[in-house]
Amino acid sequence: MNKEGVKIVTIGGGSSYTPELMEGFIKRYDELPIREIWLCDIEEGKEKLEIVGKMAQRMWDASPYDVKVHLTLDRREALPGADFVTTQFRVGLLNARIKDERIPFSYGMLGQETNGAGGMFKALRTIPVILSIVEDMKELCPDAWLINFTNPSGMVTESVMKYGKWDKVIGLCNVPVGAMMDEPKTIGKTLDQLTYKFAGLNHFHWHKVFDEHGHEVTKDIINAMYEGKDMGIPANIHDIPFFKEQLLRMNMIPCGYHRYYYREEEMLAHGLKEYNDPNVGTRGQQVQQTEHELFELYKDPNLDHKPEQLAKRGGAHYSDAACETIASIYANKLSHIVVTTKNNGAVPDLPVDCAVEVSSYIGSTGARPIAFGPLEPAERGWVQCMKNMELCVEEAAVTGDYGTLLQAFIINPQIVAGTKAKRIMDELLIAHKKYLPQFADTIARLEEEGVTIKDDVARELTEKGL
């Protein structure tokens, strides 16, 4: 690693989150002296890359630091000599997310970005791309760290380790960051007075909390959740309360995404209500509007700081977590950060070589996971089911095997197994034909059989090649 200055490459650089990434790097410049930044995107993202790239440069120009932001549509131009590569891309852009949501909803099942059928298909599109990025990194920047916050972050990061054979990778999520920012104030504490211990999987973890005297305060925070205290759940998750008795029994705080499992009935009803309202639409359709508003702001030649509107996106604080992780590796800070990394016994209920999301110390050798210990029966059952579902999805993404994907669908808790589930899967395969070359033979067979897309919006997007 070049101690005279760090080279950062961001793949998916045209993302609306990039200004937050720049803000995080500027804030940490004294401990992470950046030499150059490359923002890389694809042809379809060229306009957004140019808009956000100019804004990123304005942010640096408004700072005391002389850093040049380079823009490119060719990642092989960007990668040589990189110290850190961050990934924040969305294969198929937001239209793919909208299809992931609307097709399952059209059959009365959950359509969501990282959960259920939609989450699995996001992984199918993303894993082959991240593996191709790793192959370029092996050739062009073999000493670089890959910092991934492309969703579904857990499956994408695990695939890099398992199929890409690349160990210098860390997966990130904003959800633990949000918990640690919001919870301390509910019990009259600050974060530096508390010790957090997280364990589980990406978007499926739990945590415990201890005060500065070593006393556990998990239940104090749980009680505060039911006293009207603002817990700040991510903007993309409908706020339905957990059952208090369940949380007190488990003596752990579940992440916001557990609502899709612990309150599945209500979350599905809310999602279907939005889906059926043409004036609201699915979350992906709502995000399209937010994105449009953000990029209109980013065009302002006088804007040289992250706008407040970015907090409307569900991934707020992702980028700050990435900056802190990079700074911790560079300076061997051993900061406590919740990351996706190799288990190595931290969660003994899961295989040692699988990916888990756990509290870790981050230093020059990467993540050192902190042992959490065995889970109680209910949580053990959940996490083992979810992990094995993930492993099936990852295998299907690499092999293009239809039966393996069907296995994943059948064991996914968000899917009612049966004829409708198989139909959802078949429609999603056709809808994402452009981005699923590994399933080309299967998709050709489905088309010959006359499978068509039921949802009008998803069908129209597909017919337009979007």
Image (cartoon, rainbow, N blue to C red):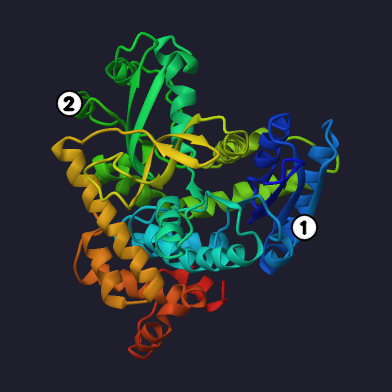
Report the front residue among 159 and 353: 353
The image shows residue 109 at horizontal and vertical percentages of 30, 58
Q: Nearer the viewer, mark 2 or mark 1?
A: 1
Classify residue 76 as left or right of residue 226: right
From the viewer's perspective, is residue 384 above or below residue 415? Answer: above
Task: Identify residue type, mark 1.
Answer: Leu
Place of residue 294 in the rendered image (x, y in percent of width and height, measured from the top left)? 68, 45
Residue 411 sits above or below residue 359 on the image:
below
- Estimate the spatial distance between the alpha carbons at disc 2 and disc 1, rounded to whole Å: 52 Å
Q: Secondary structure at mark 1?
A: strand
Where does label 2 land, which residue?
249
Q: Residue at x 50, y 36 (%)?
A: 362
**Quadrant of the rendered image containing residue 250:** top left
Residue at x 45%, y 51% (from the top left corner): 153
Q: Is residue 109 above or below residue 61?
A: below
**Label drawn at residue 351:** none
Q: Describe residue 221's horizontal placement relative to residue 316 as left or right.
A: left
Q: Are marks 2 and 1 in contact (CB under 8 Å)?
A: no
Q: Is residue 316 visible?
A: no
x then y, percent, for residue 435: 50, 73
Q: Nearer the viewer, residue 244 or 54?
A: 54
Q: Nearer the N terminus, badge 2 or badge 1?
A: 1
Give above or below for 128 relative to 202.
below
Label 2 environment density (alpha carbons within 10 Å; few <14, some 14–19, many ≥20): few
Query: Mark 1 sits on what residue?
Result: 71
Query: 59 left or right of 191?
Result: right
Looking at the image, which is closer to me, 97 or 342? 342
